[in-house]
Image (cartoon, rainbow, N blue to C red):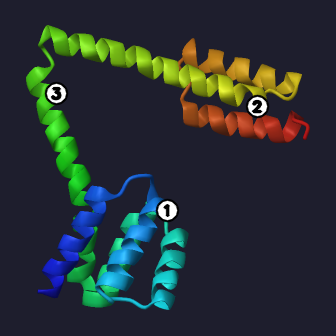
Amino acid sequence: MMLLSMLYTFFKIGLFSFGGGYAVLAMIQQEVVIKNAWLTDTEFMEVVAISQMTPGPIAINAATFIGYQKAGIPGSLLCTLGVILPSILVMMIITISYLKLKNLPCFQQIFKRLRLVSVGLIAAALIMVLGNAVQSLFAVVVFLVSFIATWKFKLNPFTLLIAVAIFGAIFGSA
């Protein structure tokens, strides 16, 4: 019964939590410490610390660790499944809907407009970041060379990042 309760609790957390990992911590604390008393406040803070140090999303790390602490490997698996299952279900619904509707003219028009919105959002982000990023002629040259290398010559972005990091360490100025 405890395992089903844990699955249900973390399913609710995964379903109703918005705003990123740190925003979900308050909801996890409410459910795990206050409502169900599975952990004390001190134990929860330890979970948060471990979840921050572990690679991956903090909500999934916390769910995995809390599940393991309370019910071993089965608890860990069910809590992790509970927190990610809502996202999986939503993405499946979106994917199935897309596959069924993608050939409808009105649906194609919607996606055509969404592409324009995406480009606009990326351009807005570029403009906001550009003011802080362009601090020297060196930065402008690195940007232009990187842009041309990626766009025109299809250079692998990972390779480009390593090359620019080395170039910046050797020739760049703080």
- Mark 2 and mark 3 lie on one chain; the one further toward the N terminus is 3
Can see residue 33?
yes
94 w.r.t. 112: above or below: below
Label total for image? 3
128 vs 78, left or right, is right
Residue 33 lies in what quarter of the image?
bottom left
**Residue drawn at the location 63% of the way across and 31% of the way down:** 160
> Where is residue 27 drawn, in percent x and y?
38, 69
Left or right position of 6 against 48: left
Residue at image point 69% right, 35% down: 163
In this rendering, does residue 56 appear at all? Answer: no
Task: Indicate the quadrant where residue 124 lies.
Answer: top right
Q: Which mark is residue 22?
A: 1
| Residue that numbered label 3 is attached to | 98
Three-letter amino acid code of the residue under disc 3: Tyr
* Quarter of the image with the C terminus in it: top right
- Nearest to N terminus: mark 2 or mark 1: 1
Mark identifier at residue 133:
2
In the depicted structure, whether residue 137 falls above or below residue 105: below
Callout 3 crowding tier (Cα within 10 Å): few <14, some 14–19, many ≥20? few
